[in-house]
Image: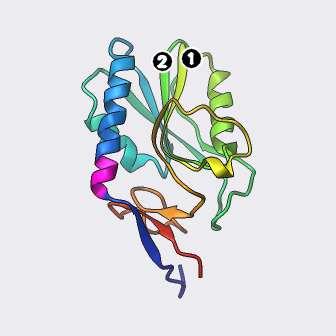
Amino acid sequence: MGDIQPELVPLLGEEEIRSAVSRLAEEIQRDYRDKNPLLIGILKGSFIFLADLIRNLDIPLEVDFIRLASYGTGTSTSGKVTLVHDIPISIADRHVLVVEDIVDTGLTTCYLLDYLRNKAPASLKLCALIDKPSRRQVPVKIDYLGFSIPDRFIVGYGIDWREHYRNLPDIRYVKES
């Protein structure tokens, strides 16, 4: 992080996030009641969202993680997606729900959904806490969405800037100087 200390401006408060997570859990629980879904969290950003989400679900489920990279150390995507850590189990004939912190350009999410679709799941859906539709470069269908926000670089609630600020309990944006 060096000497740079960005000015962080509140965007979504803890209660707003808690309410959205609860709403999403209700929708997911209704749709997956008898399906024993596999929830796949995308590391690192989704881990807090996924933890809060599954604590609100009262259905049989399994959890695993996959890790992709596309940002590096900057504030904009490189456009190149790399699979860093794959899930170690078969998803064939499973009901899979991908849990993502943020859908931005759509490049990473589209890459992942195509990758998983090729593994023949029974169903494949996407749950995202944050959507930035103005940045979209490829279409992405979000089945369960928490918030749609303007094009701002955000941190907190698992989302980082140079590996910092993930621990913030709310979501803030980095004010441009």
Is 88 situated above or below 14?
above
In the rendered structure, find residue 121 and report the number of the disc placed on it.
Answer: 1
> Alpha-carbon neighbours of circle 2 within 10 Å: few (<14), some, or many (≥20)?
some
In the rendered structure, find residue 95 and report the number of the disc placed on it.
Answer: 2
Q: What's the amino acid at mark 2?
A: His
Residue closest to the eye, 167 or 91: 167
Q: Which quarter of the rendering shows the C terminus?
A: bottom right
Furthest residue in direction bottom, as rendered = 3
Residue closest to the eye, 53 or 87: 53
Percent of width and height locating residue 142: 55, 33
What is the quadrant of residue 24 in the picture? Answer: top left
Q: Residue at x 64, y 23 (%)?
A: 117
Q: Left of 84 or right of it: where is 43?
A: left
Q: Residue at x 52, y 53 (%)?
A: 149
Q: Residue at x 53, y 75 (%)?
A: 175
Q: Left of 97 or right of it: where is 59?
A: left
Percent of width and height locating residue 38: 43, 25
Magenta stretch holds residue 68:
no
Q: What's the amino acid at mark 1?
A: Pro
The magenta region covers 14-18
Is 148 situated above or below 77?
above
Q: Residue at x 59, y 76 (%)?
A: 176
Percent of width and height locating residue 147: 46, 46
Task: Decide if residue 69 is in sight here.
Answer: no
Q: Are marks 1 and 2 in contact (CB under 8 Å)?
A: yes
Percent of width and height locating residue 150: 56, 56
**SS category of the residue bearing label 2:** strand
